[in-house]
């Protein structure tokens, strides 16, 4: 016979709380075990477990949909499930708890051996950071975090653990903390974005492993080899991540929304292009045809989603998961009332900052915290954002967007040339920085309004800087170091892939000659693309999307524009750059450039 203590809880604390408790009680008795159950919810705590109850227990079952303080159950074998699982799979839950108890009894205590004299491998206390997350984000998330903290303390190290739970991320790791860490541990049973840990020792495991083998997990992380030095392409990736890490405020939130929106726009644009390829320019009117079906998927659905996705993930960047619902609803309303991508951006920021404000200001008892992310925050913020979009924000933004669309649709040749010059120069100015992203976001947003010319100008102009540098380093070898000449091969690939950041290491080394050169070439390309009337349905992919039928109109003029811009950059580099000695410093590293 096993002695078990349990806690059940749900946001309302009425139905599921009581049903889960009753199911556990009856099944445990039938199975011949002793169980005491505490319930938590809107009515407070009932039948609270005493310290003596917990001390005498062999194991713990936490069946809860709200946050439960687990500190009092430390060192006890524990199983965490939802109330639904406890109600529907009661016997399986109890059997899992019994298995945990048996495993705990069979598992030897983790021992930390003393450091032998002369062994300095563990002499210095290490700094670690970690992230824990489970699908429900309630129990295992916090249990794993506590296990890692205790293991680090036992080993004489320090660790900060970020928990990604149902109420959002807590103890969020800063860029400085990650930079100073000797290793990173991600103990998760749900998706965790690890991009910010690039260049660090990264050990990924499950929450259960962290719970049961905390010391071994930490030692395994610290035993990982140092990441190898990156090549040129790796350098570019590091630079992009470094830039992302330094983003803050509204720019960071906007770029988060854009990054989640892009796959939707790319898929939708390609499907529209394929619809034209199979069904002609009027494919959308031929109901029941294959071209019509592709248009329904790409145009009527994917393109209808990209503004809500943009708004939803702007709000997510600001307020974490509680911001997604009001952001999505605000974005959908922006589309409905005709405010387009401009309205979606406004809706995303309002939803995010409002949800963040409410999350900070609304104070609830610990056992009612689960109400905030699933009931209170979505309800209030969605209501307020929706009313604002319908009555206050939507109408004036719609007027502004209609005016912009009308101007762009009726551009004369001179105006088109000027817009192309501006967009092209912006794409090259900071090569993936805020100015570049402003031009890019502006052009992507116009796709929803079926204005495709600025997108063509922006992508062509963004390809030119790496292409021009690659060609110049190939033709005029005495103006580039051996490292730069070798890197030109990768720069060419980055250029045709529309990765403008491929020019950054060159620009960091010689900014006063390189930046003006690439801006001239990009401006020429942007201007020619606009004057030629080229239209592009897809916001990314570089030269590879040109192979998709109807993804780009005026294909030959478009290629000519890119070639002329590349030659213009190459010529400018020949004129401005001076011959270099072979002994000069090598291509700027990611770290030097980031600094």
Image: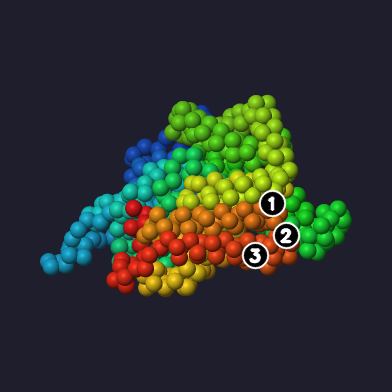
Asked which colour scheme the image uses, the reply is: rainbow
Residue 188, position in %: x, y? 45, 55
Q: Which residue is mark 3?
A: 559
Q: Is residue 208 left or right of residue 18?
A: left
> Which is nearer the N-term, disc 1 or disc 3?
1
Residue 264 showing in the rendered view: no
> Which is nearer the N-term, disc 2 or disc 3?
2
Kindly indicate the quadrant of the structure image that contains residue 295.
bottom right
Q: Give the residue furthest to the front.
A: 575
| Comparing labels 2 and 3, the label whose residue is closer to the camera | 3
> Which is nearer the N-term, disc 2 or disc 1?
1
Residue 412, position in %: x, y? 71, 45
Residue 421 showing in the rendered view: yes
Name the element at disc 1: loop
Residue that appears at 36% across and 43% down: 71
The residues tagged by marks 2 and 3 sit, at their Cα atoms, a distance apart of: 11 Å
Count residues near mark 1 (Cα–Cα under 10 Å), then give few for <14, some for 14-19, many for 20+: many
Say whether marks 2 and 1 touch (CB < 8 Å). yes
The residues tagged by marks 1 and 3 sit, at their Cα atoms, a distance apart of: 16 Å
The residues tagged by marks 2 and 1 sit, at their Cα atoms, a distance apart of: 10 Å
Q: Is residue 532 above or below residue 473?
A: above
Q: Which mark is residue 553?
A: 2
Q: Nearer the viewer, residue 562 or 135?
A: 562
Q: Nearer the viewer, residue 431 or 207?
A: 431
Kindly indicate the quadrant of the structure image that contains residue 461.
bottom right
Q: Which residue is mark 1?
A: 452
Residue 384, position in %: x, y? 61, 28
Residue that appears at 63% across and 66% down: 544
Q: Is residue 49 above or below residue 555?
A: above
Say whether marks 1 and 3 touch (CB < 8 Å). no
Residue that appears at 52% across and 69% down: 493
Q: Is residue 270 left or right of residue 315?
A: right
């Amino acid at each position: 016979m096993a002695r078990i203590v349990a806690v059940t809880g749900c946001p309302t604390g009425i139905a599921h709380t009581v049903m889960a408790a009753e199911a556990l009680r009856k099944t445990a008795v039938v199975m011949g075990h002793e169980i005491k159950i505490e319930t938590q919810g809107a009515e407070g705590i009932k039948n609270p477990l005493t310290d003596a109850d917990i001390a005498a227990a062999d194991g713990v079952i936490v069946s809860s949909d709200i946050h439960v303080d687990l500190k009092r159950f430390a060192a006890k074998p524990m199983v965490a499930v939802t109330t639904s699982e406890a109600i529907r799979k009661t016997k399986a839950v109890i059997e899992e708890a019994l298995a945990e108890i048996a495993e705990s009894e069979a598992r030897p205590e983790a021992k930390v051996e003393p450091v032998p004299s002369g062994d300095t491998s563990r002499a210095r206390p290490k700094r670690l950071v970690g992230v824990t997350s489970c699908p429900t984000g309630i129990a295992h998330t916090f249990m794993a975090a506590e296990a890692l903290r205790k293991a680090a303390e036992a080993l004489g190290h320090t660790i900060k653990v970020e928990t990604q739970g149902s109420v959002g991320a807590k103890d969020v790791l800063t860029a400085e903390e990650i930079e100073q860490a000797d290793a990173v541990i991600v103990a998760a049973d749900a998706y965790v974005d690890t991009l910010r840990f690039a260049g660090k020792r990264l050990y990924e495991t499950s929450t259960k492993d962290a719970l049961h083998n905390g010391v071994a997990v930490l030692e395994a992380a610290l035993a990982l080899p140092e990441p190898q030095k990156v090549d040129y392409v790796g350098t570019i990736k590091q630079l992009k991540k470094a830039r992302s890490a330094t983003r803050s405020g509204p720019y960071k939130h906007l770029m988060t929304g854009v990054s989640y929106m892009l796959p939707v726009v790319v898929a939708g644009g390609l499907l529209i292009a394929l619809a034209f390829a199979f069904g002609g320019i009027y494919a959308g009117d031929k109901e029941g045809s294959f071209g019509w079906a592709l248009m329904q998927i790409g145009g009527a659905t994917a393109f209808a989603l990209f503004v809500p996705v943009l708004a939803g993930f702007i709000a997510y960047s600001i307020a974490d998961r509680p911001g997604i619902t009001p952001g999505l609803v605000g974005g959908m309303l922006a589309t409905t009332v005709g405010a387009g991508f401009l309205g979606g951006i406004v809706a995303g920021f309002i939803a995010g900052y409002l949800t963040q404000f409410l999350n900070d200001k609304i104070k609830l008892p610990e056992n009612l915290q689960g109400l905030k992310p699933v009931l209170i925050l979505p309800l209030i913020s969605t209501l307020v954002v929706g009313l604002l979009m319908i009555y206050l924000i939507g109408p004036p933004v719609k007027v502004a967007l209609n005016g912009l669309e009308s101007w762009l649709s009726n551009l004369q040749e001179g105006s088109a040339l000027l817009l192309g010059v501006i967009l092209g120069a912006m794409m090259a100015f900071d090569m993936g920085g805020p100015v570049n992203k402003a031009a890019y976001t502006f052009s992507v947003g116009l796709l929803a309004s079926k204005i495709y010319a600025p997108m063509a100008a922006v992508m062509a102009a963004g390809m030119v800087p790496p292409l021009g540098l690659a060609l110049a380093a190939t033709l005029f070898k005495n103006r580039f170091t051996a490292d730069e000449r070798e890197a030109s091969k990768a720069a060419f690939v980055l250029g045709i892939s529309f990765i403008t950041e491929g020019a950054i290491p060159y620009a960091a080394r010689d900014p006063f000659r390189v930046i003006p050169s690439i801006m001239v070439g990009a401006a020429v390309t942007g201007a020619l693309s606009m004057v030629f009337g080229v239209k592009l349905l897809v916001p990314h992919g570089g030269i590879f999307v040109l192979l998709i039928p109807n993804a780009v109109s005026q294909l030959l003029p478009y290629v000519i524009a890119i070639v002329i811009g590349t030659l213009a950059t190459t010529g400018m580099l020949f004129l401005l750059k001076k011959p270099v000695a072979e002994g000069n410093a090598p291509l700027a590293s990611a770290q030097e450039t980031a600094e």
